[in-house]
Amino acid sequence: MRVFNFSAGPATLPEAVLRQVREEWLDWRGIGSSIIEVSHRGRDFMAVRDEAEARLRRLLAIPEEYAVLFLQGGATLQFAAVVMNLLRGRSADYVVTGAWSQKAYREAMRVAPFVGGRVRLAASTEESGFTRLPLPTELNLDPQAAYVHVCTNETIHGVEWLSLEPLYESGVPIVADMSSHLLSRPIEVHRFGLIYAGAQKNIGPAGLTVVIVRRDLLSDPWPGTPAVMQYGLQEANQSMLNTPSTFAIYVAGLVFAWLEELGGVSAIEQVNIRKAHKLYAALDRLPLFENRVDREARSRMNVPFRLRDERLNERFLAESEEAGLKYLKGHKMVGGMRASLYNALPEEAVDALVAFLHDFAGRYGG
C-alpha cells in the first residue's frame, strides 16, 4: 500500500505517472526497448525531449526569447554556473532568506574572485532565524548590478516569496532559484533573467535541472567556464553536450502532461492553496504545535512546524509514520517536523495529517 509521502525531495510523484512508467518500462510505444535504453540523439528520445520542452513552455507561457535547458548537477551546480555566465566583471546582488539562498551567496563569493567581479549582500533575514522576508526598505539593491539572485521558496525554513515587486522595480535581471515551487503556481517568466530548478520536487525524479534563461544573457560567459556549464553552448546543442538525464527528462514530460490534464498551473495553484490553508489552520488552532514563519511569508510547499514540548518530537514522528504519514522529520538545521505539500501530494494526505494533528494534540496536551 502506498503511504502519504511528505518528503521534501526527492518527493512524491503522481501515481498516474508512476503507473505509466511501469507500463512503458520494457517497451516504450512499441519500439521493443525502454526509452532509457536508446540513444539520446536518436529519433525516439529526441521526440520525448522536444515534447517535454513544448509542454513546459505551454504550462509556464515561456516566451520564445527564452531558452529552456535540461541540465544536470542540481540547483547547487547553478550556484557557480550563474556567476560564471552572468557576472562578467561586474557586481551581483544576493538576497538571503534561508539556507539555500545562503548557500548560493557563499558559492558566489567563492567563485567571483576567479571570474572577476564582486558579490554584494543586498539583504538578509538571518537575524530572525529566516522566519520572514526582507522589507522593501531593507533591500539595498544596486541598479547597475549584473543580476540580483533570490531563492523564491526556501525548502528548509518554509519561507516563500508570493510577490517579487520590490525586485522587479530595480530593473536588474532577476535570477531565481525556484527548485521547490516551480509549476506550483503561475509565474511571469518575462520578468526574470534566469530561472533554475532541481527537478525532484514538482517536476520529476532527481538528476535533472531545468534552466530557463533569456537568450540575450547567453553570449558572454567567463572564458574559463567549463563547456557543460556554458548556457549558450548547451542551448546550441539542445542540452546535449554530454549525455543528458534521459530517464528524468522522460518522467518530467509525463508529469508535465499530467499537470496539463489537471488544467495547468492555475488549477494546481488552487489545490495547493487549499492544502496549505488546511495545514496552517490546524497548526495555528492547536496550542501543542507552532509554525514560526511570519504569516505573509509562509510557504505553500514546505511547512516546518514543531511541538512546543520538544520532548514529544520523537513520539510524534514514530506515531505519524505508523499511521502512514511518512518523512515528516524536519531538516537537521532546524529540527522539528516539516510537511512538504508538492503538486503530486493528494489533498487527502493533508486531510489525514490534519486529523492526526488533532488526535495527537487530544492525547498529549490540547
Image (spheres, rainbow, N blue to C red):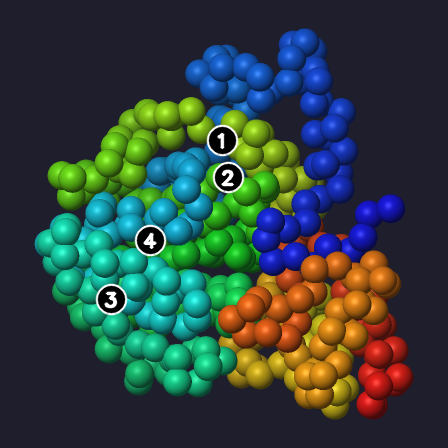
Percent position of residue 273, x then y: 66, 66
Q: Is residue 136 left or right of residue 21?
A: left
Q: Earlier in the sequence, mark 3 or mark 1?
A: 3
Using the numbered discs, state the Cα–Cα distance from disc 4 to disc 1 in whole angstroms: 20 Å
Q: For the residue labelled by badge 2, is the local secondary structure a helix, a strand or a loop? A: loop
Percent position of residue 272, x then y: 66, 62
Please name the residue that numbered disc 1 is placed on: 245
Looking at the picture, which amino acid does disc 2 mark?
Gly
Q: Residue 9 bears which disc, if any?
A: none
Percent position of residue 168, x then y: 32, 66
Looking at the picture, which amino acid does disc 1 mark?
Ser
Q: Earlier in the sequence, mark 4 or mark 2?
A: 4
Looking at the picture, which amino acid does disc 3 mark?
Asp
Please name the residue that numbered disc 2 is placed on: 207
Q: Residue 93 bears which disc, if any?
A: 3
Q: For the residue labelled by badge 4, is the local secondary structure a helix, a strand or a loop? A: helix
Q: Nearer the viewer, mark 3 or mark 2?
A: 2
Q: Quadrant of residue 146?
A: bottom left
Check whether the beta carbons of the residues at disc 2 and disc 1 lie within 8 A of each other: yes
Q: Quadrant of residue 185?
A: bottom right
Check whether the beta carbons of the residues at disc 4 and disc 3 lie within 8 A of each other: no
- Whether 31 is drawn above or below 107: the answer is above
- Residue at image position (30%, 64%) is 105
Instruction: Rate crowding at label 1 as few (under 14), some (14 to 19) or many (20 or more) other CA atoms within 10 Å.
Output: some
The quarter of the picture where the C terminus appears is bottom right
Check whether the beta carbons of the residues at disc 4 and disc 2 lie within 8 A of each other: no
Looking at the picture, which amino acid does disc 4 mark?
Phe
Please name the residue that numbered disc 4 is placed on: 79
Q: Earlier in the sequence, mark 3 or mark 2?
A: 3
Q: For the residue labelled by badge 3, is the local secondary structure a helix, a strand or a loop? A: strand
